[in-house]
Amino acid sequence: VKLSDMMKKRQLLSFELFPPKTDRGMANLSETIQQLCRYKPEYISVTYGAGGGNVGANRQVCRMVRNAGTVPVTHFTVIRNTKQGIREQLETYLKEGVDHILALRGDFPRGETSTGGDFNYATDLVKFIRDEFGEQFEIAVAGSPEGHISCRSLEADIGVLKMKQDNGADYIMTQLCWDMEQFERWLDKIRRAGVTLPVDVGIMPILDQAAIINMALSRNGCVMDRELSRLISKYWIFPNPFDKAPFDDSLEQKKADFKKAGIEYTIRQIDKYRSLGVEGIHLYAMNKWKDVSQIIERSGIRTLI
Ligand code: FAD
């Protein structure tokens, strides 16, 4: 099954999960996968720890996804990976029936300034997979609507995306982007630059204030639109250094209210993305199913019969 072919016909729904570190986390994830699969997503992707530290757990989650009747897509990075190591890992994935991959560079380990492996960029990985494995893998690549945090310019980053396409990528999974105007500009620019690949939009549900701030500011340098900034401001949960009594009793209530408003916000974002005709909605489910189910049903992407 080629997801990129399906995307040309209809808008897909998919989820992203991460491999838990504990047995308890794995047991909970099993329930999450069952629950999410009720919505018949076209695939579920599984993150890969930079450096391959969690590769065993990643493969276990891919198996769980497959056993639940859904296509697993494994993320994969070049961090600290040699050509030989990559070849062996990819052969193992194929043997286990995982033939969909998100080919990434990965983030440099803290304090380091290189990948520490044989490749420097995701473009190299895409080419390597095509050269070594032909068409055996369907390859997704990352796209950053605001430009990757360390790119020279948006234009240079779009040039990289075109290179990924030329090297054999099948579709794009995007970095989160709350700035819809920027997203539209990017979509227009990549098409004008000759990037024709389907675009599967990565959406991080707004549920937890600290996680959102961490993801936006400490990792990706994303812009928050006014509506999201106002939400965070309205339900601000962090101690204010100028206050004498930084925490008040309503902290738990604020977190709950933030989540409720965040779900509404996420649904509106999904509406906007869908109206742009993107080829897929990829929800970062963060191993949670209850809130994600609410978002799916209320946004009308899928309903349970
Ligand atoms: P690249 O495309 O290689 O780009 C990295 C930088 O180098 C960019 O600034 C780009 O403009 C520049 N560049 C790229 N190619 C060239 C070239 N040939 N010449 C010159 N400059 C170039 N990380 C994980 O560790 N595990 C995960 O599971 C994971 N999942 C992710 C899922 C999604 C949907 C996304 C969007 C990201 C994910 N990441 C994950 C994060 C990702 O690894 C980081 O964003 C990383 O910093 C860049 O990866 P990339 O594939 O975009 O890199």
Image (cartoon, rainbow, N blue to C red):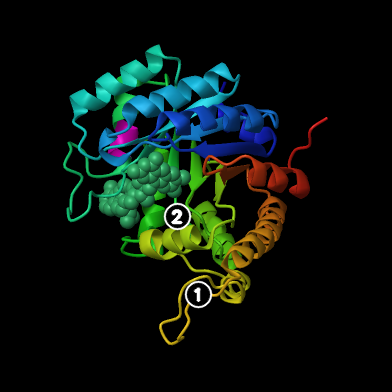
- Neighbour class for label 1 at 10 Å: few (<14), some, many (≥20)? few
> Which of the 4 image quadrants contains residue 289?
top right
Q: Which residue lies furthest to the right in this view?
A: 305
Image mark count: 2
Chain part drawn in magenta: 123-127
The label shown at residue 11 is: none
Image quarter hosting the N terminus: top right
**Residue at image coords 52%, 55%:** 192
Of residue 215 and residue 14, the one placed in the foreground of this image is 215
| Residue tagged 2 | 144
Query: Relative to residue 109, is residue 73 depicted above or below?
Result: above
> Which of the 4 image quadrants contains residue 126?
top left
- Res. 147 visible in picture: no
| Residue tagged 1 | 247
Residue 172 x/y as whole percent? 49, 43
Whether label 2 lies within 8 Å of ligand 1 gets the answer: yes
Q: Helix, strand or loop at disc 2?
A: loop
**Residue at image coords 31%, 43%:** 105
Contact between marks 2 and 1 (CB within 8 A): the answer is no
